[in-house]
Image (spheres, rainbow, N blue to C red):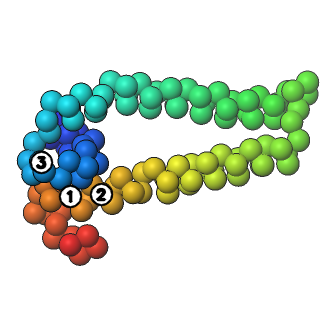
Amino acid sequence: MNQLAGLSGNVELRLLNSTSHSCQPTGEESELYNLKLRIVSVFVLLIVSLLGASIAVVSAYSKRLHIPTTIINTGKFFGTGVILATAFIHILPAAMNTLTDECLPEGWKEYEAYA
C-alpha cells in the first residue's frame, strides 16, 4: 500500500525533475503525500454532504422550512456539475499521468488503452 501511495502522489514531481529516474519516492516526495489529511478530507466531505442532503429531507417534511422543488432540483443539478467539473479538471489529468508512468508494474502496461 505504501508503494501505491508513493506512486500516485509523486508522479508530477518525477515528471518535473526529469533527471531523477528512480521509481522510489524521495524524502521530499514522501512528505508531500499526507495520508492523514486525505483521510480526514473524505470524512469532512461526508459530513458536509450529509448536512446538505438532510436540509432537503427536513424541508420536505417541515411546513415552516418548505423549499420549492425548483430550488432543490437546481441545487442538485449544480452539485452534479461541480462534481463532474472537479473530476475532469483535477482527477482525470492526474490519473492519466499516473497510468502512463514508467514505474508502473508490467500488468498495468499491458492494458491496451494505456499501452
Q: Which SS class for mark 1?
A: loop
The residue sitting at 88% across, 32% down in the picture is: 66
Mark 2 and mark 3: span between their CA atoms? Answer: 16 Å
Q: Which mark is residue 20?
A: 3
Give the quadrant of residue 6.
Answer: top left
Tag shown at residue 46: none
The amino acid type of the residue labelled 3 equals Ser
Q: Image height check: is 34 above or below 94?
A: above
Dots 1 and 2: beta carbons under 8 Å?
A: yes
The residue that disc 1 covers is: 101
Q: Residue at x 23, y 39 (%)?
A: 5
Q: In what element is the residue under mark 2?
A: helix
Q: Residues within 10 Å of mark 2 (few under 14, many from 20)?
A: some
List x then y, in percent, for residue 58: 76, 28
Judged left or right of residue 94, residue 47 is right
Q: In the image, which disc is placed on residue 97? A: 2
